[in-house]
Structures are given as structure tokens and as C-alpha cells.
Amino acid sequence: MDTAFTAEQDEIRRTLRELLTKRSGPDEVRAAVRTAAGYDPQLWAQLSEQLGLPGLALPESYGGVGCGLAELALACEETGRALLPSPLLATAGLAAPLITALGTPGQQGELLPRIADGSLTCALAVPGGALAPALGLTDDNVGGEWAGGGRAGGVQARPGDGGEWLLFGEAGQVLDGHSAGLLVVAAHTGGFARSRTLLFLVRADAAGLTRVRQATLDETRPQARIELRDCAGWLLGADDAADVPGALAATGARAAALLAAEAVGAAGSALDRTVQYVRAREQFGRAIGSFQAVKHRLADLYVQVQAARSAAYYAAWDPAEGGLALAQCLEALRVVTGEAVQLHGGIGFTWEHEAHLYFKRATADELLFGPVHRLRAHAAERAGLFAARPAVAV
């Protein structure tokens, strides 16, 4: 394993950091989240056209850049540093891998080039806001309990005319669901006896679809509640025999690596801002960063961020460890942002200061993709650490 980054990877990081430093400061972030889309469409177009960000990990045959998960993770680390509100995670991290894994050649040929050039944004909708268990991050997703089921609950699908399906139900906490041009909806079909979960494609202008943006703790991750009332959708894939839980789990592992990179980027930025502040803020005639107690706290945070960064980079190389890396990075982000608020003193608690933006990202991400102890517990279960040991004869 070669842990050194290539010149191309370093260039991706440098170019993106320079652009986001100019275009996505705290004031720009606050302005972007208050728009109807929840992000800056002009900046998204620039990231798509000039850097090919949404198509970074898509094959060149579909208009992508042809890089891998590592490059996309580096990009997510930089977007995490700036807390960039964008549809990158929902589109490139969740929907695109599912379309690549399950879609027919026709669906891939129609959708992936539009995702790669940034003209189409997507969102993954699962019932009950159960994103973490649906992606196999905090529990086994094979049973499908996360999606509701039976004759009621979740989203139900039944065959319609002309190859389309009719979907009925609702889903909450859909990342970028209010602005996405295409929804990938998890729904139950087959009735009570043969109930199974499949994925369906629903266009934003479909009749019977209602989308309402929800108030969220972290405004930089816009979420929506979607309602489907006999809404037309199309099955993702050629038939209903696809391994949907397996595809969701594989996508979840990759998404966990991206989220881990985002979290460590945010943690690193929060730490850097705190170090700058304690160097400038004076108390008792000297910079507060010169006090030994403050130095010790910052040193502990630095070690935690570096350990989390190593875990995130390893997960980008081996997505199977994504869940465990995500747990470590979310914990590091929570600790660092909490200390950042404390070390900034009274100003860190104010609405005008950017410290609260990072703290809210830490709290909201753990609520949406965790909690940390469940991520670790599921990783331990998969590793067989809780398996019953055979009795030893005495």
C-alpha cells in the first residue's frame, strides 16, 4: 500500500481549496443556505464545469473524470473544511453509485452523463429518515425493517401501466430532496406475503409528488420531506431480482468514507481557526494560546484530528472500513468543535461566529449517520467480536 498522494490528487486538493477559500467563506455559506435551493447554483456549476466534481469518480465513458473513491474523498475533505452546502454527497455519494450498480444500460446512459456534468442532481429517499440503517452503517439492512413493510408503513409500490409503477407513502430527512431533479426512492412491493424493498426513479415534476424543505439543526445539509400519492416511478434496474440491500450496503460503505473525509476536513478547519484565535486573543497581558493549559488542550485535539485523518484516508483506500472510520471522524469532529466553542469564549456562543456552524455540523451528522456507538457496535458485529465462543471443557 502506497500512502503517498499522487501529483494529480494533490492538485485536486490545492485547486479546490483555493476556489472554496475565495467563494465559500462563512458569510457566503450563510447566504447560500438561505436560498431556495439551499446552496449556491453558480458555485455548483463552476465546480461541475471546471473541476468535474460530481463526475470525479464516474467512468470516462459516461462523461466522468475516471478517478476513484480516494480522489472524491479528498474533494469531500475540502468541502468539509468550508462546510460547503452542495448536492455533492446526495448526488455523487449516494445516488450515482446506486444507478451505476443497479441501473440498466439505458438508465445509466441517460442519467450518469447528466450527473457528471452537474446538470442533474439526485437524492436518495428512504422511509422514516432511516438513512444509516438503510445503508447498513448501524445495522444489518437485509431484513428491510428500516423501510417499513407489510400492507402499511414506509413507501408502497404497485405496478401501473406502460412499465411504470405507482408509489404511495412518505419519507423524511431526505438530503437535498427539495431541490434534486431526480429521486431514488426505496419502496416496498409484492404485498404482505412477498414484501421486498426495491428502488425506483421519480422525476421532480412527477404528478402526485410533494416536497417540503424541513427546518434542520445544520442548515448546510438541507433536508426535505417528500410525499408520494400514486406518484409515477420507474424501477431502477431491469427486474425485481436485484440485490438492493447489497447495493445499498456497498453504497453506504463508500458514503461513510466520504463522510469521514468531510468530518475530518471540518475538524481540521475548526482546529485551525481556534489556533489562530488563541494566538491573537490576549488576556492578562499575553496571548491565551501561550498558557500551558490551552496548549495541552490544543495538542490533544491535534492528535485526535490526525488520527481521524489517517482513518479517513484508509477508508478511502478500503471502503469496507468506512463505518469504523466514520465513527472515529465523527467523534473527533464532536470533540474538536466543542472545544473550539469553549476556547473562543463568549464569542464562540454567538450566532454571528462561525464556530457554531461547525458544532452544528458535528451534532447533526452524528444524529443522521450515527450515533458513534452504533457505528462501532455494528462494525464489531460484522467482525465477529460478539460471536459466542465454544465452551471449554474443564
Image (cartoon, helix red, strand yellow):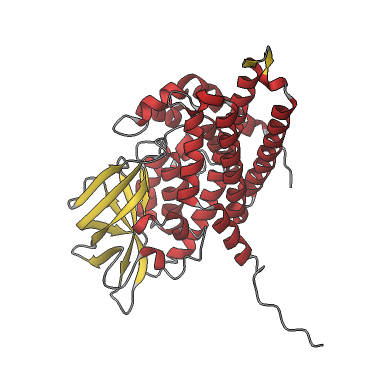
Point out the residue furthest to the top here: 285
Q: Residue at x 52, y 27 (%)?
A: 348
Can you say whether 55 is above or below 161 in the image? above
User: Which sits in the foreground, 195 or 386?
Assistant: 386
Can you say whether 90 is above or below 244 in the image? above
* Image spot of residue 76 (x, y percent): 53, 37
* Image spot of residue 392 (x, y percent): 77, 84
Camera sees residue 61? no
Viewed as shown, does residue 35 lie left or right of 281? Answer: left
Where, by quadrant of the figure, is residue 186 drawn? bottom left
Point out the residue furthest to the front here: 284
Point out the residue furthest to the right here: 394
Viewed as shown, does residue 292 lie left or right of 134? Answer: right
Quarter occupied by the C terminus? bottom right
Where, by quadrant of the figure, is residue 154 drawn? bottom left
Viewed as shown, does residue 227 lie left or right of 26? Answer: left
User: Which sits in the foreground, 194 or 96?
Assistant: 194
Q: Residue at x 24, y 67 (%)?
A: 158
Camera sees residue 135? yes
* Image spot of residue 22 (x, y percent): 49, 19
Total numbered badges shown on the rendered structure: 0
User: Which sits in the foreground, 384 or 292?
Assistant: 292
* Image spot of residue 385 (x, y percent): 67, 68
